[in-house]
Image (tube, grey):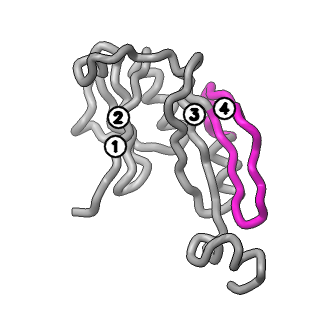
Amino acid sequence: MPQMIFVNLPVRDVAKSTAFYEAVGATKNPNFSNDDASCMVFSDVIHAMLLSHAFFGTFTTKTIPDARETCQVLICISQESREAVDAMVARAEAAGGRPDPGPKQDYGFMYGRSFEDPDGHVWEISWMDPVAAAKGPEAYAAGNG
């Protein structure tokens, strides 16, 4: 089995957040979902676990911050093209998310935008030229691809 990542996010309304992430492009895995949790699948190895605050609180003794007021993590997911980056941000906005809470990034070899989900969690969406990804941005800029 390949190594996988499960990002656990506290959400105020599991059903509302599930609908938002489905609109963005994730698929709900019903085998690992219930009233307190939704397992949202972005790929075979990338999943977001949307957990009610009550359920999330069973995993930690720390205070659950309001992601609209504080930032502890920025989650980044790649896309296959600049157009796919723009399309994902557009879907997030159409589903009630806030587009581009941070500045757009365009470095030629790398392009990125972001959105906030209904709870304020920031997702960065990025594309990187395959040459730059394989050899580094300096090789890309020098035309050594």
Confirm whether residue 123 shows in the render.
yes
Nearer mark to the viewer, of 4 and 3: 3
* Pick the front one: 138 or 42: 138
Q: Amino acid at mark 1?
A: Phe
Q: Amino acid at mark 2?
A: Met
Q: Tell which circle, 4 or 3, labels the residue nearer the N-terminal end.
A: 4
Residue that label 2 marks: 49
Distance in Å between CA atoms under marks 4 and 2 = 22 Å
Element carrying mark 3 = strand
- What segment carries the magenta color? 90-115
Q: Is residue 139 above or below residue 133?
A: below
Callout 2 touching callout 3 (CB < 8 Å): no
Residue named by callout 1: 6
Name which of mark 2 and mark 3 comes first in the sequence: 2
Q: Which mark is residue 94?
A: 4
Q: Earlier in the sequence, mark 1 or mark 4?
A: 1
At label 3, the amino acid type is Val
Q: Residue at x 39, y 23 (%)?
A: 10
Q: Is residue 136 above or below residue 11?
A: below
Measuring from the top left, give residue 143's x and y in whole percent. Answer: 76, 83
Residue 118 appears anywhere in the view: no
Dots 2, 1 in contact, CB < 8 A: yes
Q: CA distance from mark 2 to mark 1?
A: 6 Å
Q: Residue at x 27, y 37 (%)?
A: 30
Q: Looking at the image, is 28 positioned above or below residue 130?
A: above
* Tally of numbered tags: 4
State left or right for residue 96 relative to residue 100: left
Alpha carbon distance from label 1 to label 4? 25 Å
Q: Name the residue nearer the viewer: 32 or 133.
A: 133
